Amino acid sequence: MESPDAFPRFSLTQEAYAAIRSMIIAGDLPPGSRVTVRPIVEKLNLSATPVKAALMALEREGVLESKLHRGFFVPALSTADLREIYEMREALDWLAAQLAASAENHAAIATQLRAKCEQQRTYLKSSDVDAYRRMDLEFHHDLWALCGNSRLQRTGEQLMDQMRLVNSLSARVPGRVEQSLTEHLLIVDAIEKGLAEQAGAAATQHIKSVLGTFLESVNDENAAANGTEAV
């Protein structure tokens, strides 16, 4: 029989960290909302110490922001923030797609990525948008992981939580998920054929398309809220 010490206990700080992070990514704590210790302590049935430690860890990762004398807040992503995130994604995916298409095992990489696309298609047919969103992020993560550049992968993973926040919003735009799947397949097709420039161009076009659609949606929402017509 294994001793209890053979299985390290999931620390209370890790428990709090995982729970708060999940609430942010799921939208239970929406952008702009204040995150205070007491409600989380009561919700998770934990003491204040691990909750505070978890909040500070999330701040270091950019998932939360701290405002002097006001506490922690879920970042409200501005248009400038969105542009910066997508500029980083465009650079990473362009390079990853080119590297993947240039790799000796480019056909095998394409097979793995295509499998992700087929899973996305399955979730679309069942109207499971949340599962589609998760698979969408996995597609990009796998592209980074399979391209052969470990530093590129680590850089991408640092963006992942911010990508999840944006992904949860962009997936609500009508028709966006179907269009993204089509764009993913264009990237995969180019990688399968070993066409590096074409793969990079397809990745660039995909990210630009997602950003353009999202910004257009934001403009429409702002116009509707102000009672004006979007231009």
Image (cartoon, grey):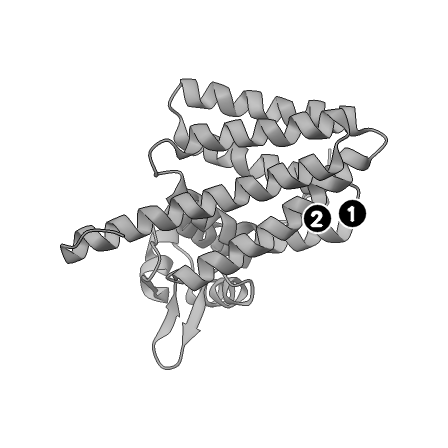
Q: Is residue 118 above or below residue 133?
A: above
Quarter location, residue 65 = bottom left
How far across and down, in percent of the image, does residue 87 sit? 56, 55
Pointers 1 and 2 in contact (CB under 8 A)?
yes
Label 2 secondary element = helix
Q: Is residue 136 left or right of residue 45?
A: right
- Which picture quadrant has residue 47? bottom left
Q: Which residue is mark 2?
A: 153
How crowded pointer 2 is (Cα within 10 Å; few <14, some 14-19, many 20+) is rated as: many
- Give the residue type that dot 2 points to: Gln
The residue pinned by badge 1 equals 149
Please report the residue visible at 58 percent of the width from the left and 50 percent of the height from the top.
Answer: 89
163 and 201: which is toward the camera: 201
At label 1, the amino acid type is: Asn
**Extreme residue toward the right, this view:** 104
Residue 57 drawn at (x, y percent): 54, 64
The one nearer the camera, 176 or 55, is: 176
At 42% from the left edge and 66% from the top edge, which residue is drawn?
48
x then y, percent, for residue 189:
66, 25
For label 1, the SS is loop
Kindly give the residue lying farthest to the bottom in the view shown: 69
Residue 38 lies left or right of residue 52; in this view the side is: left
Front residue of 201 and 90 = 201
**Image location (x, y in percent) of residue 191:** 72, 30
Quadrant where the N terminus lies?
Answer: top right
Whether residue 154 sits left or right of residue 13 in the image: it is right
Residue at far front of view: 231
Residue at 47% of width from left, 35% of height from top?
133
Check the image and report above or below for 85 versus 139: below
